[in-house]
Image (tube, rainbow, N blue to C red):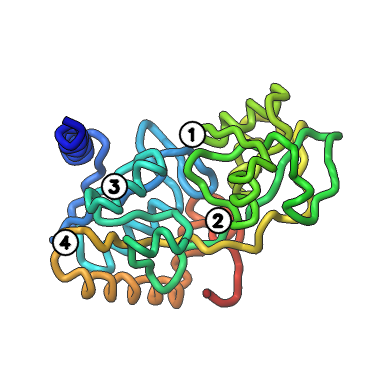
Amino acid sequence: MGNLLKIIKTACFCCVLFFSRSAFVFPAQTDPLLVMAFNHTISKPWKWKKNGEYVGPFIDVMNQVADRSGFRVALKPLPWKRALMAMEAGLVDGSFGGYKTPEREAFAVFLDMPIGWSILSIYVRAGEEFPFGKVEDLYGKEIGIVRGYTTSPEFDAAVHQKKIHIEETSNYVGLIRMLNAHRIEGIVGATSTIQAHLIDMGWADKFGRLPNPITEPKPIYICISKNSKIPHREKIIARMNQAMMDMAKEAAFGKIAQKYGYDKCVVFGCIPKTR
């Protein structure tokens, strides 16, 4: 009975992913078609919704990589944990906007060049700043993170050992509201995204960022599932790598950022060399 239930759940999951066509975006391009998942959260200055559709620099980058690589792309917004599960199961062809980790490399091939860099910082209520230089400084505190996100091995280990208590929500706005309501003592997340949300909410003066980031800048990638059924996977990945290199040479990332009124460094980071 247990195995039967697992089979039924998997079948239902497939149906939700591939027959909920209203959640897909189908540009008119050439074959083949790749279904690319991304986190459904609103994360300015990377991606957000306008008139019910996702827009922003990361969406443009993915579409442009597809155009240059010669395939159609269906963009699939999902909760991040579900996106990773779908990619691991081969239910989507890949994803974009995530970090490279050993766990994810087990089921995904990451492009050579990241689409951007993220700096993770800690935000607290204004006037309640505390010294922070190492993870141990967070011991015993209630910290909010977006569900499914990774921070650093040291932070994750401290959480696992219950030395840091975390509260999770599906988006940054929820975390900011929790912090404002004194339900948590701080937020860990992408500096540019948290700051953009605070400005939009009119709360920039209510919160402060601790001066030291929680990690060094982390690269953000496009990746392709190793379990995807797309034909000629290696050739597609090679084309995508070439497209990314061409975009960098042509200053395409700066142009995309400027389209939305942002500086390139704010959106994509200005790290001189990729890992």
Which residue is nearer to you in this view: 187 or 227? 227
Q: Are marks 2 and 1 in contact (CB under 8 Å)?
A: no
| First in sequence: mark 2 vs mark 3 | 3
Q: From the image, state whether disc 3 or disc 4 is nearer to you.
A: 3
Q: Nearer the viewer, mark 2 or mark 1?
A: 1
| Residue 122 position in % (x across, y down) | 70, 45
Amino acid type at mark 3: Ala
Name the residue tied to disc 3: 86
For residue 263, side relative to residue 140 (left or right): left
Looking at the picture, tell me which residue is in the foreground, 20 or 263. 20
Amino acid under disc 2: Val
> Is disc 1 in contact with disc 3, using a CB cutoff of under 8 Å?
no
Q: Going 52% across and 56% down the picture, which residue do you hit?
A: 258
Residue shown at 65%/63% (left/top)? 216
Q: State which tag comes first along the sequence, 2 or 4.
A: 4
| x then y, percent, for residue 25 | 25, 44
**What is the distance, in whole Å, between disc 3 and disc 4 at their CAs?**
15 Å
Mark 2 or mark 3, which is nearer to you? 3
Element class at badge 3: helix
Q: Is residue 101 above or below residue 19?
A: below
Label of residue 230 in the image:
4
Residue 213 — which label? none
| SS assignment at label 2 | helix
Find disc 2 in the rendering and name its residue: 267
Which residue of the protein is positioned furthest toward the front in this rendering? 1
